[in-house]
Image (spheres, rainbow, N blue to C red):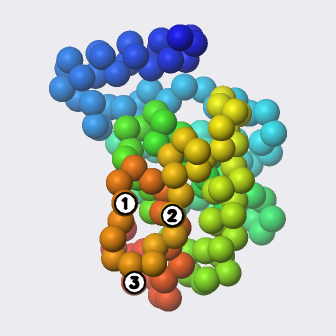
Amino acid sequence: MTPEEKARCVIDNNLRQSGRYAKSSFKYFLPLDVKGFRKCQINAINNLEKSFADNRPKALVQMATGAGKTFTAITASYRLLKYGNMKRILFLVDTKGLGEQAEREFLAYTPNDDPRSFSQIYGVRRLKSSYIPNEEAIVDDRCRSCRFCKML
């Protein structure tokens, strides 16, 4: 068992015993391995995780064109699934082209702390019906307006 896995087990056991697992798990993200990240991506991920740890579940990540927003979002999704006790992630885009691009990037993404790809660890599916599988990242390109985003 790696040191990371041991730390995760201790955190998991303590939180389960205290009965505060779901909300408190956001406070226990292990530090981000910054190898291969730009400064703006590191700041975005760290600030997002800080927002969740401070019990502010709504957050906006704003980055310039070409700054690696999709890569940053995939990394944040991976960390939420791994450390945040999330069961699945909905990655919503507004065009079919962006949905296809996001799906390709999710399939190709390999985290710094695991040699397997994101899709081998958690699974990635594009929605083609109203059925949402459990414990998978979902890429949905059916959003045609911001009405759904306003509900979040």
Q: Nearer the viewer, mark 3 or mark 1?
A: 1
Residue closest to the eye, 46 or 85: 85
Circles 2 and 1 in contact, beta carbons < 8 Å: yes
Is residue 54 among what the camera can see? no
Circles 3 and 2 in contact, beta carbons < 8 Å: no
Name which residue lies at 47% across and 14% down: 7
Residue bearing the label numbered 1: 133
Residue 147, disc = 3
Query: Element under label 1?
Result: loop
In the displayed structure image, the side of residue 33 where residue 144 appears, left or right: left
> Against 71, is 47 above or below?
above
Q: Amino acid at mark 1?
A: Pro
N-terminal label among 2 and 1: 2
Q: Nearer the viewer, mark 3 or mark 2?
A: 2
Crowd band around label 1 with a 10 angstrom C-alpha radius: few (<14), some (14–19), many (20+): few
Name which residue lies at 51% across and 70% down: 126
Q: CA distance from mark 3 to mark 1?
A: 23 Å
Residue closest to the eye, 16 or 49: 16
Name which residue lies at 69% across and 64% down: 104
In the displayed structure image, the side of residue 104 where residue 73 appears, left or right: left
> Against 137, is 44 above or below?
above
Q: Residue furthest bottom?
A: 144
Crowd band around label 3 with a 10 angstrom C-alpha radius: few (<14), some (14–19), many (20+): few
Residue bearing the label numbered 2: 125
